[in-house]
């Protein structure tokens, strides 16, 4: 049994029924500058000390590093309330998606760190060296409130290195503009075979006009990878877990798996057949919401966060969703990860930042986020709001029934540090500089070299 399998179908199903409890509070501390000033005033009264403490709290600042794909405007709403209630100012440092990982690695390795940063856990713990560079948060008070605590525990040592945002995430599917598809003759489409998915694309293309059948944002390689990250385990279906374990044991090669080549060739054909936008190499995730909501594009392959973004910015746009039946398998790929906030050990105010995380997790502020970004909170006492119907339907149809598989990134989390290189090979393939066979051969060589360097058994 692989380590990521700790998350059971029952645990995933439970996320959709979260209860409401009360709100909590948090203690305030003096800023270091205020403490120094207080030493100079040896004869201040207790009332003056109290005033000084309240004033110094206003100077507390937390640097919060994240990337464009993870940052939500609701963070600013939460931050404004936290500053008003606790005197803590949050300095958001938002980095382009394609620059974030390399910047984060440099900061961690040089100890020039922010107070807190956002990344996926636990599947990417090893990638960022969480055990080495980040604080163990397992003993923090918010842990007892987690709705799905097993999901966020580190695969190797069982510790919790990040404060999670969700109880689960990664519902990867096609999200589409209902009006656009209805105009093409499709109401609530549920393709059962891959050809039926292509039939929808063909119908949209045949209508002509300027509407793009399937919008692609390949400048952000994390969106490029979704088709394959989902497609590999779905296409393999029941053989997936065994196949991935054999790869990890070096018993087979990436070129030995025909389902990998099938998915890659299907992906390349989407571009060759003119289903996607011509500017796919320069298009980014940030442009996708406007394209879908305004009908300039019909469909976008993404995660549930995209649906929430659409409804937040374009509430009049009705979205639907369906899965891609890779290799004619009707299962949804999902993630065994959540987004989390990590505290670097090299930070200059670690204890204060831990206190800030407890405040950030408070239902009062979490409810502000889920009021306009409804979903599945990490905490049992937070109101997840009214989940976007097209997301809820995916949960009802696939998660609650157990009809899902985990994405390859989670099933082979040992490769988390080198996945971005594979995603770049995908872009080389659709740009015409690599075939699907060359992608797999190039990746196989890099994969073996990486596993040898990491000292994995069998290599």
Image (cartoon, rainbow, N blue to C red):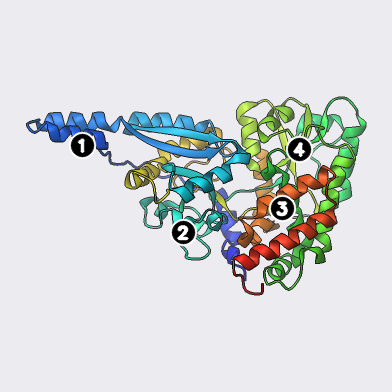
Report if residue 207 is visible in the image: yes
Image coords of residue 124 (percent x, y): 56, 54
Image coords of residue 295 (percent x, y): 77, 26
The quadrant in which residue 431 appears is: top right
In the rendered structure, find residue 345 and report the number of the disc placed on it: none
Q: Please name the residue that numbered disc 2 is placed on.
A: 131
Tag 1's secondary structure?
A: helix
Report if residue 377 is visible in the image: no
Q: Earlier in the sequence, mark 4 or mark 2?
A: 2
Confirm or deny contact between disc 4 and disc 2 (CB under 8 A): no
Q: Please name the residue that numbered disc 3 is placed on.
A: 422
Q: Judge whether 2 appears above or below 48 on screen.
A: below
Identify which residue, 415 or 187, lies in the foreground: 415
- Mark 2, Cα crowd under 10 Å, few <14 / some 14-19 / many 20+, is some
Q: Earlier in the sequence, mark 1 or mark 2?
A: 1
Q: Earlier in the sequence, mark 3 or mark 1?
A: 1
Q: Earlier in the sequence, mark 2 or mark 3?
A: 2
Identify which residue is drawn at 50% across, 56% down.
129
Q: Earlier in the sequence, mark 1 or mark 4?
A: 1
Image coords of residue 42 (percent x, y): 8, 33
Q: Please name the residue that numbered disc 1 is placed on.
A: 35
Identify which residue is drawn at 60% across, 64% down.
5
In the rendered structure, find residue 216 and report the number of the disc placed on it: 4
Tag 4's secondary structure?
A: loop
Confirm or deny contact between disc 3 and disc 1 (CB under 8 A): no
Q: Earlier in the sequence, mark 3 or mark 4?
A: 4
Identify which residue, 41 or 388, lies in the foreground: 41
On the picture, is 39 further left or further right than 447?
left
Identify which residue, 441 or 230, lies in the foreground: 441
On the picture, is 334 further left or further right than 26?
right
């Amino acid at each position: 049994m692989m380590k990521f399998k700790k998350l059971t179908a029952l645990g995933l199903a439970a996320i959709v029924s979260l209860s409401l409890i009360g709100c909590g509070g948090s203690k305030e501390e003096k800023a270091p500058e205020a403490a120094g000033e207080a030493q100079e005033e040896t004869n201040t009264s207790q009332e003056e000390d109290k005033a000084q403490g309240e004033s110094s709290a206003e100077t507390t600042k937390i640097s919060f590093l994240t990337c464009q794909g993870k940052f939500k405007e609701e963070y600013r709403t939460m931050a404004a309330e936290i500053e008003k209630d606790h005197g803590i100012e949050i300095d958001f440092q938002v980095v382009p998606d394609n620059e974030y990982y390399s910047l984060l690695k440099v900061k961690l390795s040089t100890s020039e760190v922010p107070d807190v940063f956002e990344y996926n856990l636990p599947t990417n713990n090893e990638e960022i060296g969480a055990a080495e560079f980040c604080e163990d948060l397992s003993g923090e008070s918010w842990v007892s409130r987690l709705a799905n605590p097993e999901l966020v525990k580190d695969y190797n040592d069982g510790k919790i290195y990040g404060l999670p945002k969700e109880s689960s995430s990664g519902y990867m599917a096609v999200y589409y503009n209902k009006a656009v598809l209805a105009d093409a003759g499709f109401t609530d489409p549920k393709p059962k075979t891959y050809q039926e998915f292509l039939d929808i694309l063909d119908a949209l293309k045949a209508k002509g006009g300027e509407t793009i059948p399937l919008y692609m944002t390949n400048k952000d390689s994390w969106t490029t990878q979704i088709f394959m990250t989902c497609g590999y385990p779905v296409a393999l279906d029941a053989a997936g877990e065994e196949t991935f374990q054999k790869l990890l044991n070096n018993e087979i090669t990436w070129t030995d798996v025909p389902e990998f080549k099938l998915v890659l060739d299907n992906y390349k054909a989407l571009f060759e057949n003119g289903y996607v936008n011509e500017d796919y190499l320069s298009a980014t995730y940030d442009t996708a919401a406007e394209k879908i909501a305004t009908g300039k594009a019909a469909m976008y392959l993404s995660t549930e966060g995209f649906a929430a973004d659409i409804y937040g910015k374009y509430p009049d746009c009705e979205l639907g969703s369906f899965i891609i039946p890779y290799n004619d398998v009707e299962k949804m790929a999902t993630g065994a990860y959540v987004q989390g906030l990590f505290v670097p050990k090299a930070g200059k105010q670690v204890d204060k930042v831990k206190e800030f995380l407890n405040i950030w997790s408070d239902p009062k502020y979490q409810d502000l986020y889920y009021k306009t970004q409804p979903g599945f909170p990490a905490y049992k006492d937070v109101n997840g709001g009214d989940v976007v119907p097209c997301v809820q339907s995916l949960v009802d149809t696939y998660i609650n029934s157990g009809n899902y598989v985990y994405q390859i990134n989670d099933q082979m989390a040992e490769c988390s540090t080198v996945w971005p290189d594979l995603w770049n090979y995908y872009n080389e393939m659709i740009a015409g500089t690599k075939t699907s066979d060359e992608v797999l051969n190039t990746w196989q060589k890099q994969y073996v070299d990486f596993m040898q360097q990491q000292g994995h058994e069998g290599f």
